[in-house]
Image (cartoon, grey):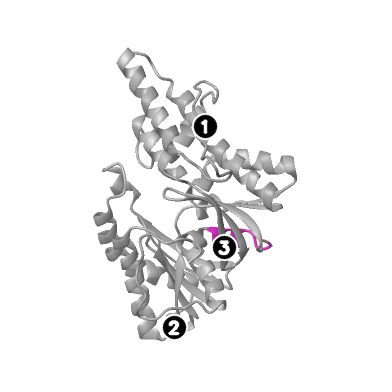
Amino acid sequence: MLILGIESSCDETAAAVVEDGRRVLSNVIASQVEEHRLYGGVVPEIASRRHAEAIDGVVRRALEEAGVTLSQIDGIAVTYAPGLIGALLVGVSFAKGLALTTGKPLIPVHHLRSHIAANYLAHPELKPPFLCLVVSGGHSHIVQVKDYTQFEVIGRTRDDAAGECYDKAARAMGMPYPGGVALDKLAAEGNPDAYPLPRPHVEGSRYDFSFSGLKTAVINRLHNAEQKGERINKADLCASFQQRVSGMLVENTMLAAEDLGASTIVLAGGVSANSGLRAGMEAACAQRGYALYAPPLSLCGDNGAMVAAQGYYELLAGHTAGMELNAIASLPITE
């Protein structure tokens, strides 16, 4: 079964063709990173306009590289939630047009579900149930994946997402967008024990996260040093920050795994590319004898292949939509 996947939730216009939810035939991405770097972050209006300009060519190229025509496609999957509403609307509108003209099933796909599905493309042996840590610029969730379309959120951030915290801390240190990538790179040169940073806890919840206080602590340290004329070793501060964030993510995930009896752990989302998080999770899983799965770096960010992969399982479950489908800016993974 061939699924065309379309992704436009943020600043990547992407399309891909995937066979049976596991085999990537094409995966085309048009990135807007260089343009948004001028502004220090994603500008929603610009993102929407660039999606509208790129989407037709991206989809055509995905079909061409896969060596298939629209008539051979069995379903059209599209990210409809969550994300930037204007950006989402471009992808949803284009997918609806394709579905209407071809008579192919229209498959709505939740963005976080598709990030989890990226692992199916890299690890053919991976099957639910498992416990997944989904970490990105806008989301930090510990999700119990009971089946391909059945999810339960075990833990989540109560304020900033981990990726958002990374980007804001990096911006405070004068690093270019996307800050998380630059911070990760510089952290490799620093001492992770150089700067003591707080470890925020969420009272009454073993698995939830809180990153806002940690972000504020970094900003305050920078401001205090500036006021006193002191020099901050940015590599050391990056390493200390990264150790704290990855430590929080790993610790809560391990707590959830132990309590739920889960022995298969999965990483997903853009922040799953972070070297500190990967190393910390690998060490924790090896110590406990857990199996760990993570997508290759090429599938950590937003892409159409992950949408097509999840779309395959949504179609098998009968989850299709008509022309009433609309984009939704915020939506739980369970809906």
Report the span colored magenta: 116-125
Q: Which residue in the protein does label 3 denote?
A: 151
Nearer to us: label 3 or label 2: 3
On the question of residue 233 being in view, the answer is yes
Give how far apart the Cα atoms at labels 3 and 2 are.
27 Å
The residue under label 2 is which amino acid type? Answer: Lys
Rendered residue at 61%/38% (across/down): 280
Give how far apart the Cα atoms at labels 1 and 3 are.
28 Å
Image spot of residue 333 (x, y percent): 49, 61
Image mark for residue 199: 1
Crowding at dot 1, Cα within 10 Å, few <14 / some 14-19 / many 20+, comes out as some
Image spot of residue 215 (x, y percent): 41, 34
Among numbered discs 2 and 1, the one appearing first in the sequence: 2
Among numbered discs 1 and 3, the one appearing first in the sequence: 3
At mark 2, the secondary structure is: loop
Q: Which residue in the protein does label 2 denote?
A: 104
At mark 1, the secondary structure is: loop
Is residue 162 shown in magenta?
no
The residue under label 1 is which amino acid type? Answer: Arg
Rendered residue at 37%/66% (across/down): 58
Among numbered discs 3 and 2, the one appearing first in the sequence: 2
On the question of residue 262 being in view, the answer is no
184 and 135: which is toward the camera: 135
Q: Is residue 186 left or right of residue 24?
A: left
The residue under label 3 is which amino acid type? Answer: Phe
Rendered residue at 60%/51% (across/down): 294
Give how far apart the Cα atoms at labels 2 and 1 are.
50 Å
56 and 230: which is toward the camera: 230
Crowding at dot 2, Cα within 10 Å, few <14 / some 14-19 / many 20+, comes out as some
